[in-house]
Structure formats: structure tokens, C-alpha cells
Image: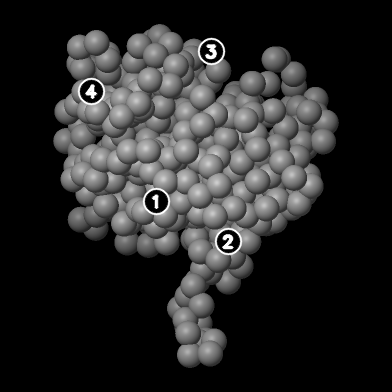
Amino acid sequence: MNADAKTLAKQFQPKQTKVLKPDRQLVTIRFSPCGKYLAGGGFDSIIRRWDVAATEPVELPPLKGHGGWVQAIVFHPDKRRLFSVDSWGQLFAWPYADKNPQRLWSVDKAHDGWIRDVAISADGKWLATCGFDQMVRIWSTDNGKKLGELAGHGCDVFSVAFHPSGQSVVSGDLKGVVKQWDLKTNKVVKEFDARIMYKLSRLQDVGGVRRLAFDPLGATLGCAGTQPTVGANVQGTPTILLFDWQTGKVKHKMTIGGNGDGFVFDFHFHPAGFVMAVTSGNPGTGKFFFQKPGDAKPFFLATNLPNCHALAVHPDGKHLAVSATNPGSNGNGRQLKNNQYVGNFSPVHLFEMAGA
């Protein structure tokens, strides 16, 4: 679709419809392929589920069993299974539509420590995971059997994605290196240079490729993160690099906001040809935006959702969900309530694009 920004702005204008209010922070949310369910994982080691097909969303019994922070989830295209990973190195499979789901299978030490991301192949046969142990691993979705191990990053691996063809997987690391792996040989085919997303500052490694995604045709690879300027209280400009899949060259560079706006934590390609993304930075800052590759600025920008960490896109391409953070999330000097420290939580904002 080659519509200009004005046309896109009219056709794809998000209107908020509902707000879900879980009592803990979520770091990942995704819609099921059937569109009926929204699931989210976070700091409290559980996966929350909502039936969003009803007029009023209904929260369902959660999925319990993880030991650590639920970092990422992915649905199987068969519309029956959900896979989840956590900060303890666990990988689980669930029958997510069941009334009270019990695990189908689990790998209790899929990685040594924090698993950063999980992705599924288009045919639903394979999972890819990556983590703090510098490894990328391939698993069978049927039984959790390890099918392959991809070594060579040499630092924390933050993100993985399968190419739509199913022949390759890509992984992005702390230092801004993205590797393309041939799944037949487990060898690196080529590398994509996203090193502007890394900085060594005050003896601290800052940045990393936080999210990878392909456009629907697999012609463009998107890498999201920040251009860091300083460590400690990390400062950086949210950035997305769009690479030509065949040549490995940067086609477009998107930046949003300024040095205090932090990271692009989640993004997706819309079938209409634009990028949808959310950012989080200093306490209280966050952006939700749509931008056409090549344009200098977004055609839609919301700045009233603080510290957005996840963006879910419904299969119909018309409905979205954004996981943000409650207002006043900076805990320094916060008063106790009934002698209890009140933690942060993640309002989940539901949107519909009226003109889509």
C-alpha cells in the first residue's frame, strides 16, 4: 500500500475503547490467532488471560507455574497452544483456551538463566529462544525437544524472529549485532549492523536489539532499541532500523522523541505498510505511534500512556492493545498505604482503528 501519511492518518486513527486493570506489571501482551483471547505475562510469574470477544472483556483464570518473571509469550497458529518463557530459564507450553489449563510440557532449564525472547515459525513446528547465557536454541513445539543450538554471539541475546519463509532465524544481541542463521546447518549466513544501539558507558553495557520483526513479505527486517548516550540512569533516543533482507543494508532509520525517551520495546508491521511501536524511558514517559517508513515523523502519536512496554495486534488488523504503566510510577518517596508499599501495575489500553 502506497498511501501517503494524510490518507493513513484518516484510515488508521486509534480510538480507545476499554482499559483492563491487572494489579501487577506486564512486560508482554499478545492476542490469540483466533482473536478471542488476550494474554499477558509479567513480574508476578503468572500469565493473565482475558476473553476480549465479549462486549465487556472477561478475565479468566491465569496460567500458573513459572518461577520467575514471564518475559515473553507466543501463540501457536493452531489456535490451541501458547508458549511462555521466564527469567529462571523455563519454557512452558499451555492449552490456553481450556477453562483451567495445565501445562502440556515444560523445559525447566531451557537456558542458563534469563530467557529474553521466544518466537515461533510460520508453520508452527519450531520455537526459537534466546537469553542471558548468550545462546539461541531451537525447540519442537510438539514436545519441547531441543532440535538445535546456535552459538556465536558472545554476549546477552535479547531478541529472536523467524523469517516468514521458515528457512532462517535471526537473533539480536546486547552489542547491536544481528545474526541470520541457516537452520539446516546452524551456521551464520550474514550479519546486520545495528551497533548504534549499543554503548559502553561508565563500565556499563547499555542498549541492545530489544525486538526483531519482519514485514509480511519478509523483504524487510526491523530492529528496535535505543541510541544510548549514557549509562547509569540510561538515556537514549528510541530507534528502529529497517534493513533490506537481501542486501543487509539499512533502508530506513526511525527515531522518535529525544534522549530521555528510552527504548522502543515493542513494534509490528501493519499489512498496510506502516510501523506501529511503543516506547518507554524515564519515569512517566512513553509513546505509542504509527509511522510510514521513509517519513520524517509519525502520522499518529500518543504521549499520554506512560512507560509502554508491549503492543499487541489483533488478527483483524483493526484492534490493538498497549500495556503501559500506572501514573506516578516513580516509587521514590512514595507513601505507604495501610503500612503496605503500593507497587506499580500495567493498565492495558484497548484500541480500535475506526477507519480501518
Q: Which residue is mark 3?
A: 217
What is the secondary structure assignment of the residue under circle 4? strand
Which residue position holds label 2? 22
Discs 3/1, front: 1
Q: Position of residue 249 (x, y in %)?
A: 40, 17
Q: Is residue 126 above or below residue 63?
A: above
Q: Which label's residue is closer to the chain start, 1 or 4?
A: 1
User: Considering depth in this image, is 36 or 30 the residue closer to the camera?
Assistant: 36
Residue 70 has which mark? 1
Q: Specify which label sits upstream in the sequence, 3 or 1.
A: 1
**Does dot 3 land on a helix, a strand or a loop?**
loop
User: Which sits earlier in the primary sequence, circle 1 or circle 2?
Assistant: 2
Q: Mark 2 or 4 closer to N-term? A: 2
Amino acid type at circle 4 is Leu
Dot 4 surroundings within 10 Å: few (below 14), some, or many (20 or more)?
few
Is residue 353 visible to the viewer in this orientation of the structure? yes
Q: Tell me where residue 168 appears, x and y as whole percent.
A: 34, 15
